[in-house]
Amino acid sequence: MERLLVLARHGQSEWNLKNLFTGWKDPGLTELGVEEARAAGRRLKAKGVQFDVAFTSDLTRAQRTCALILEELGQSGLPTHADAALNERDYGDLSGLNKDDARAKWGEEQVHVWRRSYDVPPPGGESLKDTVARVLPYTMREILPRVMRGERVLVAAHGNSLRALVMVLDGLTTETIPGLELHTGVPLVYRLKDDTTVASKEVLDRD
Ligand SMILES: O=C(O)[C@H](O)COP(=O)(O)O
């Protein structure tokens, strides 16, 4: 039985382009972001991937990415569940600030800790640990059972909500998670064993 789980970060958003902390804010995709999402769909198609169900967040950039990937696969109209549990990490007081301005104000190191550490939340926002605490129960309850039943599942979400999942799937630790970067519009194709651990992982990077 195929146990397929594809994780895709959304394409470039308007605020990615402007280099702003985004979190729970809801900008749309840029033209490049639309193209990145379509290209992700085309790369999945070239691998012969088809889905039975899709999951996404309640934010526009992920939902649009999900729809564009499915369109490229000729699967528009596939059952799709949108849930805030898959939203980007809440960037709290940093939301809307420019990332370079933040580095100038608080220092490179502090901003890196807020962006990439496991358990240090940005002021008023969520740490990755907080994000794991909502992404993982939702995944265990809604997504994993379907994968294990043989449904082919697409999850179109965000840099940090997907880092939360990849941390668990790849067995990363609090020491190694800061090194993980997920790029816009790059699908990660996982196949799971019958004990839910990872049988294989393929990164469908841009050419
Ligand atoms: O929410 C955001 O600002 C980004 O899309 C993810 O940001 P990060 O790379 O700073 O975690």
Image (tube, rainbow, N blue to C red):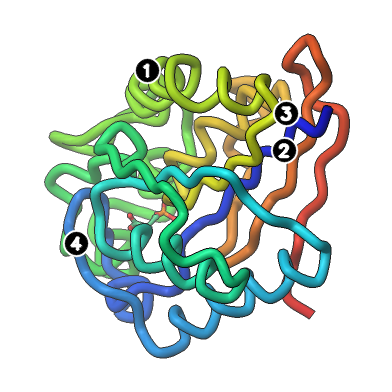
Q: Which residue sits at x=29%, y=78%?
A: 14
Tag count: 4
Instruction: Give me the C-alpha separation between circle 1 and circle 4.
Output: 22 Å
Q: Earlier in the sequence, mark 2 or mark 1?
A: 2
Side (left or right) of 110 relative to 201: left
Q: Position of residue 185 (x, y in %)?
A: 56, 67
Instruction: Tell me the residue that label 1 is attached to.
Output: 133
Q: Can you tell which quarter of the image residue 147 is in?
A: top right
Which residue in the protein does label 4 denote? 26
Kind of residue indicated by mark 3:
Asp
- In three-dimensional space, the C-alpha distance between marks 3 and 2, rounded to whole angstroms, equals 15 Å
Looking at the image, is mark 3 or mark 2 nearer the viewer?
Answer: 2
Q: Mark 2, mark 1: which one is toward the viewer?
A: 2
Quarter in which the C terminus is drawn: bottom right
Question: Upstream in the sequence, badge 1 or badge 3?
Answer: 1
Q: Split into 4 quadrants, where in the image is the N terminus?
A: top right
In the image, taking residue 126 as reference, residue 74 lies left or right, namely right
Q: Indicate which disc residue 4 carries.
A: 2
- Category of crowding for the residue at label 1, using alpha-carbon neighbours closer than 10 angstroms: few (below 14), some (14–19), many (at least 20): few
Res. 138 image quadrant: top left
